[in-house]
Structures are given as structure tokens and as C-alpha cells.
Image (cartoon, grey):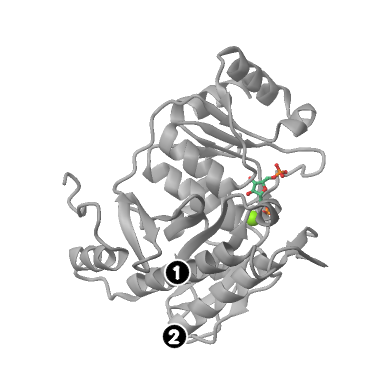
Amino acid sequence: VSHPLALPVGVTLDRYIMHRQTAFPYATGELSQLLRDIALAGKIIHREVNRAGLIDLTGGMGIQNVQGESQQKLDMIANIRFSRALKNGGEACAIISEEEEEIIYTGNNHAKYVVAMDPLDGSSNIDVNVSIGTIFSIYRRVTPIGTQPTMADFLQGGRRQVAAGYILYGSSTILVYTTGHNANGFTYDASLGEFILSHPDIQSPADGQIYSCNDGNLDDYELGVQNYLTQCRRKKYTARYIGSLVGDFHRNLLKGGIYLYPPTKKNPDGKLRLLYEAYPLAFLAEMTGCLATSGYQSVLDIKPFSFHQRTPLYIGSPVMVENLLNML
Ligand code: AHM
Ligand code: MG
């Protein structure tokens, strides 16, 4: 056990969080509780995702979410479940969600934290039994405790995140998160109802051979990106693209690779959302030795101005990202 905060694989998330908290004597335990609430929401969504095919939860509801994309039933359910878990938990005073235009006030104005989340990302994969994920990002509020939270609490910038992570509902369900010291992965054991430490202190390979992008958009990509992808093909790299950011990121994190979502004609600012997609994954990336850039600057340095703002995203193994940047 090398890292001073490390615990052996096999411990539960609860024990791990408790252990971390005692390592920081001034911690009051509220962030720990918030992380437990998020894990609980993850378990609930795991259950919904896994029985989705049985009880006809999936399928479009025929309405659109605030970005004009068709909203799947399971997205909405995840949104409701997640918001409810955070409201009941009491540690978050406000939430923003991909599925809602405005701030969700939890009524807990004495809580210290705000949460930005994409409750179920990879919506095109929900109906077809392919991996999907939850992404979350946590800030300490900047408005006074006891008052109504505001936009300012969310628009602090990526470097002010106090914790971030994702839950991937894949061949197994795994929660990966960081509080800014290192990043750890906890695989869900449904028979025990517990997340178990399975990937302690994740460090990504410096270089990789997997590239992940929507090849159908190739003609829209700027020349530098096209040249980079040509180089990937010449080197016989492997193309892997699920279309679920969490799944593509997680695979590349463990195996070494790069994920690209450049600007396109349809999405000239990129498709992915800064606050609850790019920032949290960029925070994890920096903790695990990866890089995340918009092509112009580090994702964590992008200035936030609105809740649902988008950004181009290039994220993954540092050698690959540097290589791409040299060609842009
Ligand atoms: P969503 O939030 O509507 O699910 O969109 C985000 C998803 C990412 O998970 C994924 O990487 C990307 O959109 C795929 O987009 P595309 O289908 O354009 O390749
Ligand atoms: Mg999303």
C-alpha cells in the first residue's frame, strides 16, 4: 500500500470514505456524506438501468430536453432519482442537471455544496443495452450559508471543483471519483449492495493506441484533427467509439487512448457540456496523469459563463493529446 491514503482493494466505499475523512482532521464529514448520497443514487440508477428492458422504461417520451435532444424515459428517471437522493441527503443546496434548464433548489440552504450532473449520459445507447453513465461535479458554495444559492456557486471554474467522478453502468457498474488527491474506482457488488475498491489510485498509461471519435463527422473536423486521425490509421491504432462519453473515457483511462469531440457544423462549439461533462472528466484526467484540452487551453481553465455551455474536448493519454495539439 504505497499511497498514504490508500487502503487495500476489497474495502467498501463507506469504509474508504471514512478512512479518508479521518486522514483530514478538519473535515466535517459533509463532503463524505454527499459522496455517500451520490453512491446511493448510483445504486438506484444501476437498478433502474438493469431492469429497464423488462419494465418498458426505455424509449423516447416524445419530448425534448433543454438542448433540443430527444429525452429518453430513463434519463428523466435518473434525473428524478438523483435529485431526490441529493435533496434527501441534505448536503447539497442546489443542483444543475443536463436535463433541466434552471437551478434545482433542494431547499437545504444551510448545505455547503452544489452539484452539477449529467444523470444519464449516452442517451442514444439507452434503448439498445449499451453502456451509459452518470457524471457529477461538486463545488463548495461561494454564497453565504443560509441564503439561496445562485449561478455564481456553479460558475467557479473547473479548478475549483472539490470532487468529481462518474458511474459507468457497463458489464459491471463502477464508480470512479476524485477529491483532488488521487482517483479510485469502486466496482458495485449487487449481491452485497456495496461499491468495493477495485481500482485504487488509478494511473493512466502515458501513451496509448486507441482513438475514439465519431468518424461520421470527419469531414467537419478541422484539418489538424483530420491529419491526426490519418496518422492514427497509418500507425494502425485501434478505433473504438461507443458514443457514451463515460464508457469511452473509462476504457481509454485504463488502456491508454484519446477521446475526441471536435467542433462540427451541427455543434460549432463542440457537443459536450463544460460543467457536467468536460470539467469533471478533466479533473479526473489530471489526477490520473492524462490531459484534457479544448484545443486552445486546458479544459479546467476554460471560463464558465452559462450552465449548459459546450466545449470541444480532446482527452486522454498525455503523449497522444500533446501529439494532437502539435498538429492543430
Ligand atoms: P448526451 O448527453 O445527449 O447523451 O450526449 C453526450 C454523448 C456522449 O456521451 C458521447 O460521447 C457523444 O454524445 C456522442 O455523440 P455523437 O452521437 O454525436 O457521436
Ligand atoms: Mg450528456
Q: Ligand 2 near label 1 (Cβ, under 8 Å)?
A: no
Q: Alpha-carbon neighbours of circle 1 within 10 Å: few (<14), some, or many (≥20)?
A: many
Q: Alpha-carbon neighbours of circle 2 within 10 Å: few (<14), some, or many (≥20)?
A: some
244 or 150, nearer to the observer: 244
x, y (%) of residue 60? 77, 63
- Amino acid marked by disc 1: Ile
Number of dots carrying numbers: 2
State which mark lies toward you, 1 or 2. Answer: 1
122 or 280, nearer to the observer: 122
- Compared with residue 45, is residue 129 higher up or lower down, i.e. above or below? above
Residue identified by numbered label 2? 110
Q: Is residue 181 visible?
A: no
226 or 195, nearer to the observer: 195
Q: Horizontal placement of 192 versus 19: left or right?
A: right
Which numbered circle lies on residue 130? none
- Which residue is at 76% across, 65% downward? 65
Tell me the quarter of the image containing the C terminus: top right
User: Is label 2 in a helix, a strand or a loop?
Assistant: loop
